[in-house]
Image (cartoon, rainbow, N blue to C red):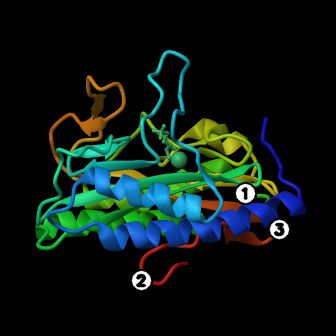
Amino acid sequence: MALIKTPKEIAILKKGGALLSSVLREVRAACVAGVTTKSLDDLAQKLIKKHGGTPSFLNYRISPSDPGYPAALCVSVNDEVVHGIPSKDRIIQDGDIVGLDIGMWLEGLCTDMASTVMVGNVPKKTQELVRATREGLVRGISTIRAGGTVGDIGDAIEAFIKPKGFGIVRDLVGHGVGHSVHEDPNVPNYSERSAHRIPLVTGMVLAIEPMINLKGWRIYQRDDGWTIATEDGSPSAHFEVTIVVTDDGYELITPFPDEEVAA
Ligand code: MF3
Ligand code: CO
């Protein structure tokens, strides 16, 4: 069932989303060659606490058999798609692309967002991947309005990404969010007939999150029980925002944390 948030809940989500975006902006700035991925999680935890929030990923389980997620921030480097676990042994290198994914509880409601940082001298094709993934997200959310359907989002993302020859991850999708980290409905980042049967309604809060691979769309999970990586080893980019559906469009709950103009 699609969960509709009340105006009061949306006000709280917006407050939390603005704070979360400021946290991610600071973590992005700290993501430079020579730092460990663990140091980025330490910073994220410190900033979330400073704002009076609670990390929503820490100890989270997607399915009951999962090990609880051990950090506040997912750090996914190069061929890692999402859910990379921060480590004191993993040092960011010049030329890496680094997906940073973060969620926060504030006053009983949670928001979710992600951004991919290009560190130093990134190969040109990989730069194109990162920019296209961000633009794919913008195209996807730009279609959103009450009276449309969840399927419109994936249609717009696929129409933009497919001609570039990049692989759209199919096994992981966007989702409702707010009362829990993952709620209905699923939001595919590709054209999906069944998603056209799910109407977008004013007050729905969705996390839209294209995961795009430079080559093939196939992924696998590493033995740590969390990290998702591309099967062919090609790099992967990920951007995510939380939005609320409105009568004539959408509003960002989590503003983009980077400098490019947000839609
Ligand atoms: N933003 C992530 C997602 O929607 C949530 C990560 S769950 C975690 O998949 F436990 F890995 F943190
Ligand atoms: Co998400």
Residue furthest top as drawn = 65
Q: Residue at x 54, y 33 (%)?
A: 60
Residue type highlighted by circle 2: Glu
**Element under disc 2:** loop
Q: Are the two marked residues, 2 and 3, in contact with CB atoms closer than 8 angstroms?
A: no
Q: Earlier in the sequence, mark 1 or mark 2?
A: 1
Residue type highlighted by circle 1: Gly
When asked about the image quadrant of residue 161, the answer is: bottom left
The residue where tag 3 is placed is: 247
The residue where tag 1 is placed is: 148
How crowded is the residue under tag 3: few (<14 C-alpha within 10 Å), some, or many (20+)? few
Q: Which mark is residue 259?
A: 2
Q: Earlier in the sequence, mark 2 or mark 3?
A: 3
Please name whichever residue, 86 or 214, is drawn nearer the observer in this view of the structure. 86
How crowded is the residue under tag 2: few (<14 C-alpha within 10 Å), some, or many (20+)? few
As displayed, is residue 53 above or below residue 33?
above
Across and down, in percent, residue 199 comes to 76, 48
As displayed, is residue 206 above or below residue 179?
below
When asked about the image quadrant of residue 124, the answer is: bottom left
Kindly tell me whether residue 239 is visible in this rendering.
no
